[in-house]
Amino acid sequence: DPLRVRTYKLPLARSLAQRRRPPVPFEDCRTPIQMIISEKSQMWPSEMHLRSYTRLGGPKEWISLTEMDQWSFGRAFQEMYAGLVMQWFTAHGAAPCGVEAEPAR
């Protein structure tokens, strides 16, 4: 993936940790949300994600990566992760992409 983040620096971590007000309350959110979390994450505990997930009002999917880190730079992990995400987008109306896809008009 040429767009992946290759290194993480303190400003990025700091910005992720800042509290931000959501544009709508979670209960009113109708945007489809897929949460892929790692039970091994020490920075973002799964219980924190679960509290937010249960409040979401729209279509949602919870995927827990057991015995895996939240992210890996290995190709097998990236393909597995991308496959989960592409299935989600396809199930929620995203146009197919790839070699066999029709060109946009």
Image (cartoon, helix red, strand yellow):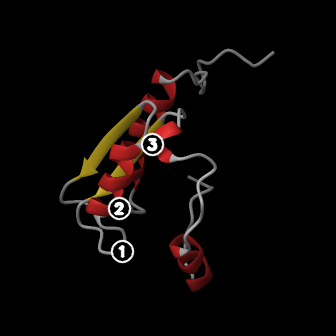
Looking at the rendered structure, the secondary structure element under dot 3 is helix
Q: Is residue 69 left or right of residue 15?
A: left
Q: Is residue 54 or residue 67 the one in the foreground?
A: 54
The image shows residue 19 at horizontal and vertical percentages of 55, 70
The crowd level at tag 1 (other Cα within 10 Å; few <14, some 14-19, many 20+) is few
- Alpha carbon distance from label 3 to label 2: 13 Å
Q: Is residue 3 left or right of residue 49?
A: right
Amino acid tagged 3: Ala
Dot placed on the residue nearer the N-terminal end, 1 or 3:
1
Q: Which quarter of the picture shows residue 80?
A: top left
- Alpha carbon distance from label 1 to label 2: 10 Å
State the quadrant of the C terminus.
top right
Looking at the rendered structure, the secondary structure element under dot 1 is loop
Indicate whether 77 appears above or below 95: below
Q: Is residue 33 or residue 105 the one in the foreground?
A: 33
Please say if the residues under marks 1 and 2 sit with CB atoms less than 8 Å apart.
Answer: yes
- Say which residue label 2 marks: 70
Q: Is residue 25 or residue 89 the one in the foreground?
A: 25
Q: Is residue 61 left or right of residue 97?
A: left
Please say if the residues under marks 1 and 3 sit with CB atoms less than 8 Å apart.
Answer: no
Amino acid tagged 2: Gln
Amino acid tagged 1: Met
The image shows residue 81 at horizontal and vertical percentages of 39, 46
The image shows residue 46 at horizontal and vertical percentages of 28, 60
Q: Is residue 66 left or right of residue 2?
A: left
- Say which residue label 1 marks: 43
- Say which residue label 3 marks: 82
